[in-house]
Image: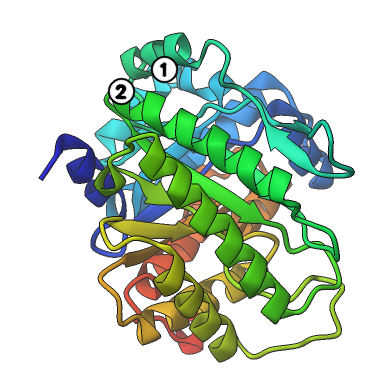
Amino acid sequence: MSELNKIALQIISNGKGILAADESTATMTKRLDGVNVPSTLENRLLFRETLFSSSAMTDCIGGVILFDETIKQISTKKNKIPKLISSMGSLPGIKVDTGAKVLAGSTNEKITEGLDGLRERLKKYYELGARFTKWRGVYSISEKHPSKLAIYSNAHSLARYAALVQESGMVPIVEPEVLMDGEHSAKECYEKTSDVIKKCFEELILHKVDLAGIILKPNMILPGNKSKDKISNEEVAKLTLECLKSSVPSEVPGIAFLSGGQSEIEATENLDLINKYNDTSFIMSYSYGRALQQSALKFWSKDIKNIEGTQKIFNHRAKMNTLAAQGKWSKDLEN
């Protein structure tokens, strides 16, 4: 077992999942504005630190994806943030892409940037304590999209990123996200997601990436948020499994789903059903942002000094998802 494979398994084994706390300052400001809390450096740190010091970090969270601002911060108790996360029994990770920009030669499609100077940045992040990284490629669905150009360009970037990350001794999370925005059916989502994931693995193999030392972070198979096509949670789970079985090489140790605009309960229920039907060797876990934090954020915004109450809500959500990652969740447990 390679060192990278060990790290990947440590993050997502035994029902543990990933807390995606890597919102950029602009995104975090939007979230805080939404609950009427000023987006100051102190408030952003306080909310994140509240989550990072909760008991769920030891019991449920195997890794935390950080943003550049956060990985360099010192907690209110004078602890470096990566050190705080490690002391709770979780692994610090870091988002290393610099965002999605308009893809030249294609209309309305995006390419993720950040390869320039990445090798040097990775060295610094490793020194700061990071042991895994994240890079997100985004794809939209419409009659013409994702285009072959978008599928290829993003797969190529994800592979180059992953190769550099493994070279630096860290595990890359490979995140090709086919967005939920649109009127497409679940069948279209299935087809486009399959195309995207297959191309990603073609490129990863071409770039000599050790597939046993990555974590795949895909979307679930869902109809678009403006679609007339409605499908059951069971169908979501079965289509998602079918898609991954036909697209992901068996060497990959695990898959940590993004929540991609689903509500907290939907994201948990769908993950649970995926695990109840899972007949593969893949670990199926979660890498959620909003679907882990939203209720805690709403509660915290009413009194930002109520650390214990906020942690209680976060602990519950994390516990529900950890049960779902083992196929042991049920709606009754939510109350």
Q: CA distance from mark 2 to mark 1?
A: 9 Å
Residue 231 % position (x, y): 69, 89
**Neighbours of disc 2 within 10 Å: few (<14), some (14-19), many (20+):** some
Q: Which residue is mark 1?
A: 122
Residue 300 % position (x, y): 64, 47
Q: Earlier in the sequence, mark 2 or mark 1?
A: 1
Tell me which residue sits at (48%, 53%) in the image: 217
Q: What kind of element bears circle 1?
A: helix
Residue 206 % position (x, y): 39, 39
Quarter location, residue 67:
top right
Q: Nearer the viewer, residue 165 or 291?
A: 165
Q: Amino acid at mark 2?
A: Glu
Tell me which residue sits at (82%, 46%) in the image: 34
Indicate whether 236 appears above or below 307: below
Residue 98 % position (x, y): 64, 25
Residues at badges 2 and 1 in contact (C-beta under 8 Å)? yes
Give the label on residue 167, or none: 2
Q: Nearer the viewer, residue 12 or 41?
A: 12
Q: What kind of element bears circle 2?
A: helix
